[in-house]
Amino acid sequence: MPTYWRWIYVLAGAALLGIAFFFLMRSANKNLETLQAKSKKKRRK
């Protein structure tokens, strides 16, 4: 088995982790925005 296969797997794993992290952060940001909007509505009352 050639050595460059290992690097392909490493790069693929890093890319998958990066994409997963990106989507997690984006969903967390959406959750934070909705929480802030709810708290702002509560403050207005």
Image (spheres, grey):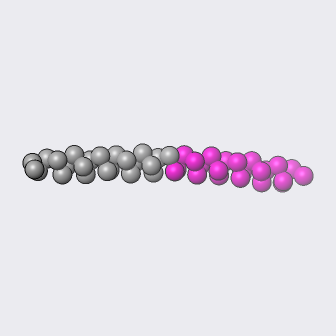
In this rendering, position of residue 40 left or right of residue 27: right
Point out residue 30 in the picture as x, y percentages from the top left corner: 62, 46
35 falls in the magenta region:
yes
| Residue at point 45%, 51% (across, down) | 21
The stretch in magenta equals 24-45
Front position in the image: 43 or 14: 14
Secondary structure of the magenta portion, mostly?
A: helix
Identified at 82% across, 49% down, the residue is 41
Q: Residue at x 71, y 51 (%)?
A: 36
Q: How many marks?
A: 0
In depth, the one of 28 and 40 nearer the eye is 28
Q: Position of residue 37 (x, y in %)?
A: 74, 47
- Residue extending farthest to the front is 1
Q: Is residue 28 magenta?
A: yes
Q: For this view, does 20 lie left or right of residue 8?
A: right
Which residue lies most toward the right here?
45
Whether residue 43 sits left or right of residue 4 in the image: it is: right
**x and y percent of residue 23 in the render?**
50, 46
Between 20 and 37, the one nearer to me in the picture? 20
x and y percentages locating residue 33 in the rendered image: 67, 47
Question: Residue visible at 58% across and 48% down?
Answer: 27
